[in-house]
C-alpha cells in the first residue's frame, strides 16, 4: 500500500481495522536531543476474540524519538480502529508497540497496557524495544495496578 499524505488538517474516514489504519510521522526538529514523548490513552477499547465482549485498557506509550515523531491525529485514528477488533490483551498491546516502532523507528519505545478486570483478573502487558538511552529521564507511567478491595 502506497503511503498517503498526512491525515492532519483534513477530514479522513475512521479506519475499520488496525491493518487499514495509517500511522503518520513527521520530522523531529530536535533529533540531536534525547527526550521522551508520552501518549496516554485512558479509554482504549477492543473486543474479546472469543466472546465479542468489550475489553478496556489504559495505555501508556513512551518513546525517545529519533528522526521522526509520531503524529497524534493518526495515533488517535489507529487506536480507534481497535474498537471492533477482536484480539487478546497481550496481542493488542504488543501489536500497537511494534507497529509504532516500525513506523517511526524511535531510539527507544515502551508501551504499558493496563487492562481492566474481566472474570475477576486484571492483566497488565508491557513491551519495549531494547534499552533506555543513557541519561534519558523516563518517569514512571503512573498507572496504579488494579487493587480491587486489596
Image (cartoon, helix red, strand yellow):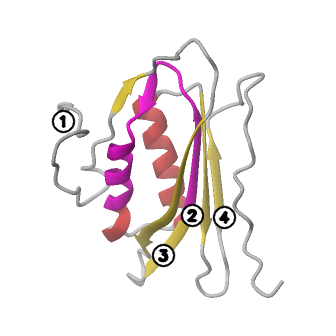
Q: Earlier in the sequence, mark 4 or mark 2?
A: 2
Residue 58's disc is 2
Foreground disc of the pair 2, 1: 2
Split into 4 quadrants, where in the image is the N terminus? top left
- Front position among marks 3 and 2: 2
Q: Nearer the viewer, residue 139 or 122?
A: 139
Q: Earlier in the sequence, mark 2 or mark 1?
A: 1
How busy is the neighbourhood of tag 1: few (under 14 within 10 Å), some, or many (20 plus)?
A: few
Q: Residue at x 66, y 32 (%)?
A: 130
Does residue 79 sit above or below 52 in this rendering?
above
Camera-near label (4 vs 1) is: 4
Q: Which mark is residue 124?
A: 4
Q: Residue at x 45, y 21 (%)?
A: 28
Tag 2, which secondary structure?
A: strand
Residue 69 lies in the magenta stretch: yes
Q: Position of residue 45 (x, y in %)?
A: 43, 69
> In the rendering, at what x and y percent does residue 109 appear?
59, 37
What is the spatial separation of the Cα atoms under label 2 and label 1, in whole angstroms?
Answer: 31 Å
What's the magenta region?
Answer: 58-81
Q: Tell me, yes or no, whether the two marked residues, 4 and 1, touch with CB atoms within 8 Å.
A: no
Q: In the picture provided, is 25 more to the left or to the right than 66?
A: left
Screen quadrant of the C terminus: bottom right
Q: Earlier in the sequence, mark 3 or mark 1?
A: 1
CB atoms at circles 2 and 1 under 8 Å apart? Answer: no
Circle 1 — which element? loop
3D distance between C-alphas at marks 4 and 2: 10 Å
| Residue holding disc 1 | 1
Amino acid at each position: 500500500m502506497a503511503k498517503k499524505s498526512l491525515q492532519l488538517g483534513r477530514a479522513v474516514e475512521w479506519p475499520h481495522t488496525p491493518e487499514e489504519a495509517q500511522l503518520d510521522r513527521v520530522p523531529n526538529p530536535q533529533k540531536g536531543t534525547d527526550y521522551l514523548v508520552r501518549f496516554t490513552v485512558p479509554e482504549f477499547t477492543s473486543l474479546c476474540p472469543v466472546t465479542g465482549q468489550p475489553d478496556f485498557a489504559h495505555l501508556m506509550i513512551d518513546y525517545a524519538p529519533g528522526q521522526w515523531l509520531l503524529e497524534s491525529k493518526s495515533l488517535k485514528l489507529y487506536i480507534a480502529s481497535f474498537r471492533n477488533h477482536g484480539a487478546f490483551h497481550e496481542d493488542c498491546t504488543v501489536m500497537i508497540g511494534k507497529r509504532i516502532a516500525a513506523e517511526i523507528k524511535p531510539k527507544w519505545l515502551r508501551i504499558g497496557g493496563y487492562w481492566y478486570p474481566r472474570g475477576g483478573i486484571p492483566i497488565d502487558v508491557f513491551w519495549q524495544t531494547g534499552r533506555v538511552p543513557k541519561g534519558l529521564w523516563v518517569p514512571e507511567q503512573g498507572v496504579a495496578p488494579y487493587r480491587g478491595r486489596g
